[in-house]
Amino acid sequence: MIKTTLSLAIAAIISAPAFAGHDDKNLVIEITSGLPQVENTLQSETGAVQASPTTDGGELLQSLSGVSGIRMGGRSIDPIIRGQSQTQLNILLDGAYIHGGCPNRMDPPTSYTSVDSYDSVTVIKGNRTVVYGGGGSGGTVLFEREWPQLDEKGYGGELSASYHGNGDRYELGADLAAGSDDGYVRVIGHKSEGDNYKDGDGNEVRSSFESLSKSLLVGYRLSDLTTLEASYEKQEEDDVLFAGAGMDSPYADADTARLKLTHEFEQGALQQMRLELYKSDVKHNMDNYSLRSTPVGMMPLQAPSTSDTEGLRLMFDARMADIDWTFGADIQNNERNAELQNSAGVAQRIMWAGAEIDQTGFFAEGEKVLGADDIVKAGLRYDLITAEATRRDETAGTVMAFPTLSSDAIWQMAGAPTGAGEERTEHNVGGFASWTHRLNDQYSVESTLSRSVRTADATERYMARSTGMSDWIGNPELEPEKHHQLQVSLQGNLDTMSWSATGWYNRVDDYILRQATSVPAGMMGTKNRDVYRNVSAELYGAELDVGYQLDENWQLGSALTWTVGNNLDDDTPLSRIAPLELNTSLDYQKDHLQVGVEWQL
């Protein structure tokens, strides 16, 4: 199947003046797939509104080389990098982790991003850093904001707008800041709405949504060497329809607070200290009746849920023994609760029974330049993980005069022992080592060897949904995934063209596989049951990117991605692996106008 996309966006930008150093407040996108500090020449700078308008961070990432996505509706695309998704990717929103509230991934972290409210997006493919959390075998994505640099007038701002014809989708944004070198106040707002769109055959696809985000950021310079920043952000998603799911989402709200302290050292080996604290609270609901007709023969049901995350990251930059070091510690605690209820709000099942996963990590990585042509870099990370379902013995009462089962009893139906949801502890060790060699002024090569360990998430461990028609049951006994990867990259930079080629192989011990089975269901005969188990697996692939600057306004780019995933225990392919993809784009940008054409094959 060939998918061709033609998009036109015109950004109305009002600058009074624009932030210094951010002409038209360009969003800088950096992709590091192998060589350090490699900018994607295809989309190194795009305006606040992309040539192809995007509804959230997932759609933006999907447009980049080597990144695909899982789509259930018009919003909330769950990104995939090198055949890996969900918690195989570390996604940070201005330093904070936000874990969605939907067990079925209606609200991945990227759904809580308004793209034009961030100043930069960095995509690190594979395991090439240890400072942003454990796991991250598929990659790390950083949505970041910067301290606004204002001129002598002391204020600046921007208004933006975009429109997408299929589905009557529009986005409106405002980003205003005032202050001086001593401090600032910044206010960001973004509103987006879309109706159902029509597919290639003219059929209407359920995909409408409403989205509203509001952010307040303040910063104060405590001294010449110390800054303090705080922010509060509220993201509201309403009436989101999902053609690819049995329910829709009446609401999904995220409240995120952040505090950042940065201190520069004038003397000694230490250069900088960064302390970051954050708290994110997500409330989500999905149902099968308020936004659609309840299917014949089914009860009206809803599934309200919460996901609360709090974290801390302390990092130091230093230079010792001619090595640039980054080291520190981080903490991340997440608690999730979810129930299956009838339309009156009476609980029928407890799906996430107080699922708590706490992580404490210690990390260090260093980079050393060896002569004029070589760089070596390595990192090591240790994570202490504790996981427990605190409400595992709790039941939801009765359903149709029959007592319901506790989560612990449901896990036993799938083979878990009694008390499987009690506290478990893991000691996970990961790291990487890389060598970069410059062949000449135009060509460089890099090789990276890494190990990363990903702990099972709340759904894989503790999901407990059992009905007369189907089961979805987690496995509290799951072992963490261990990824061992080898990657080799070659890059060329010419006057008007740049290119990169990457090959990689990932052997996975204890890969966490979601498997569909069939089990007896009494008078109903049989029913479907989804369970989780550990298997041995492998993933491998290749990526080729080419960018050509036709002139100062026109840019041509092409990217080819090939990925394979295999379940070695069962000799079957892994699911959710994107096929061979070819993306070609032609972009024109001049002043405040940007036009782009993109083909996806």
Image: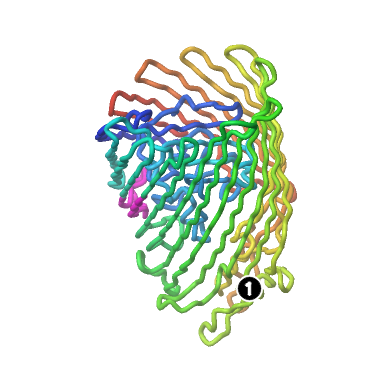
Q: Position of residue 573 (x, y in %)?
A: 65, 46
Is 502 situated above or below 453?
A: above
Tell me what residue is drawn at x 64 percent, y 58 percent. Answer: 515
Q: Position of residue 402 (x, y in %)?
A: 56, 85
The answer to which image quadrant residue 209 occupies is bottom left
Return the residue nearer the eye: 209 or 190.
190
Tell me what residue is drawn at x 41 percent, y 71 percent. Answer: 296
Q: How is the image coloured?
A: rainbow
Q: Position of residue 581 (x, y in %)?
A: 52, 34
Tell me what residue is drawn at x 46 percent, y 68 percent. Answer: 304
Q: Secondary structure at mark 1?
A: loop
* Dot 1 amino acid type: Arg
Return the residue nearer the eye: 434 or 554.
434
Q: Which residue is mark 1?
A: 392
Q: Is residue 202 magenta?
A: yes
Q: Taking the image as drawn, is residue 528 in sight? A: no
Tell me what residue is drawn at x 31 percent, y 49 percent. Answer: 191
Total number of numbered discs in the rendering = 1
Q: Is disc 1 surrounded by few (<14), some (14 to 19) or many (20+) residues within 10 Å?
A: many
Return the residue nearer the eye: 397 or 202.
397
- Which contiguous range is marked in magenta? 193-215
Q: Is residue 2 magenta?
A: no
Q: Position of residue 557 (x, y in %)?
A: 45, 24
Q: Taking the image as drawn, is residue 362 in sight? A: yes
Q: Is 222 positioned to the left or the right of 453 in the image?
A: left
Q: Is 601 positioned to the left or the right of 544 in the image?
A: left
